[in-house]
Image (cartoon, grey):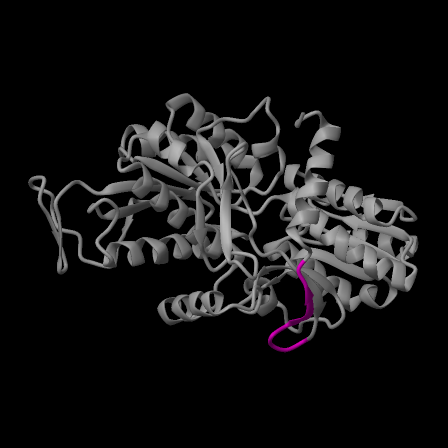
Amino acid sequence: MSRNVISGYVTATVTSLLLMTGNVCWSQEPIKVGFVSIFSGRVAMLGETGFKGAQLAAEELNQRGGVLGRKIELISRDSGGKIEEAVRLARELITKDGVHFLIDHSSSREAFAVKEVSRDLKVLTMVTASETTAHTADPKIWTKYSARTARQSIHDAVAGGYYAAELARKHGLKKWSSVSPDYAYGRDLTDNFFWALKSFYPEVEIVSQYWPKLFEPDYTAHINALLRDKPDAFFSALWAGDLVTFVEQANLYGLFKKSMFFGINLADYTVLKALKKVPEGLHSGTRYLEEAPPTEANKKFARDYSAKYGELPTNWAQECYTGMRMLAGAIEKAGTTDTEAVIGALRGLRMNLPWGAPPEGIVEMRERDQTLIYYATGWGKTISDPPYVVDLVFPPWSEILKYEDKWLKEQGWLQ
């Protein structure tokens, strides 16, 4: 993909240290942020909607005078979902395009590799899509040059386990299965979910687990296996186009009438809008919904995004918006684009953002591991029409953090 420079103004040719763009006079060179993601293929929605979120944040910042009086300039590249390409592009953005910072909006497969580019070249990368807990939790691979504004699987798992355990007790859901993608994120989130579910409801028994390939075109074999197993309920970490395909096929076979469905990734507008009809009575975590959290700030974000792009935002859009805003906040706090100073300013940074959990609405970049906490993560039941998910429950962060620490200690990752 050719270089794609995004701004709300017409970019002028740089002939000196004085840059003129629209009605804004920029006294210094722009702050360049490289954006590596998947813009092609079955999950192109990942890169497309994520980039729109980062673009919206950058344009808002530039309209206010930029950051430290400097324009934010976003440069995007398409990895095509290939690990080697993501690594090559990340390195090229730093060494050839001269970006000051990276946004890595890749799946966990690429993100673990891009992390090593950040470490090697000592450039701060905001991780806005990889949710695999180990990315920031495992001290053996942790690096201060990666900071995550994506949600992470242990948080989603504890919130999901908290919610599912209440329904399991109420409906006697003791026999459970799963169908999740066969790579780090899918296995990590599924294992974490069952760990949390059993922590809250020890009577649970796992009767079967299935691991389709990422981007699997046909889930018939897995659906038939679940019908044979007859679990009371099952969990899925499928996402994006894979989840749409699975839900459509499972609906044809009547699977959801036989077993109760729990899946973190269903309640996102990209998936909900892609389905021919949203099945009722499925249980999903909230990815991005304008009513989750039900705050004016979140509704305004949805309105602003929709006015600009003619569609509702996704979870990826909000994660990238958050990453861009947190990065800008750290640069402002540091008073410089120096990497080490910005990393120091980012640690412990708290900001009032649309994704913040109610009632405070404030997210925090946790100092110990540079991962986001206090974002809104809820669960509810689907209906076929807007708002699509009702009876929302937002598990308290005190419970999420308590069980996260317990799980991390079991892994030997927290003393």
What is the tally of numbered marks visible in this picture?
A: 0
- Residue at horizontal 43%, vertical 47%? 323
Q: Position of residue 254 (x, y in %)?
A: 82, 67
Point 30% across, 58% down: residue? 60
Direction from residue 25 to residue 83 in the image, left or right: right
> Can residue 33 be seen in the rendering of this structure?
no
Question: Is residue 38 among what the camera can see?
Answer: yes
Q: Horizontally, is 408 left or right of 131 in the view?
A: right
Residue at 26% over, 33% down: 98
| Magenta-colored span | 384-394
Left or right: 228 as drawn, with respect to 91: right
Between 271 and 141, the one nearer to me in the picture: 141
Q: Quadrant of the N terminus?
A: top left
Q: Tell me where residue 410 appears, x and y as whole percent.
A: 75, 29
Residue 150 location (% of width, % of height): 53, 46
Q: In which image quadrant can residue 70 be found?
A: top left
> Residue 234: x, y in percent?
81, 54
Seen from the viewer's position, the closer of residues 202 and 402 is: 402
Q: What residue lies at 86% left-to-right and 51% top-to-bottom? A: 176
Q: In the figure, 404 relative to 339: above or below?
A: below
- State whether residue 31 is above or below residue 411: below
Residue 219 lies in the magenta-colored region: no
Q: Nearer the viewer, residue 254 or 147?
A: 147
Would you say residue 393 sits in the magenta stretch? yes
Tell me the quadrant of the picture where the C terminus can be found.
Answer: top right
Which residue reaches farthest bottom?
385
Tell me: 112 left or right of 183: left
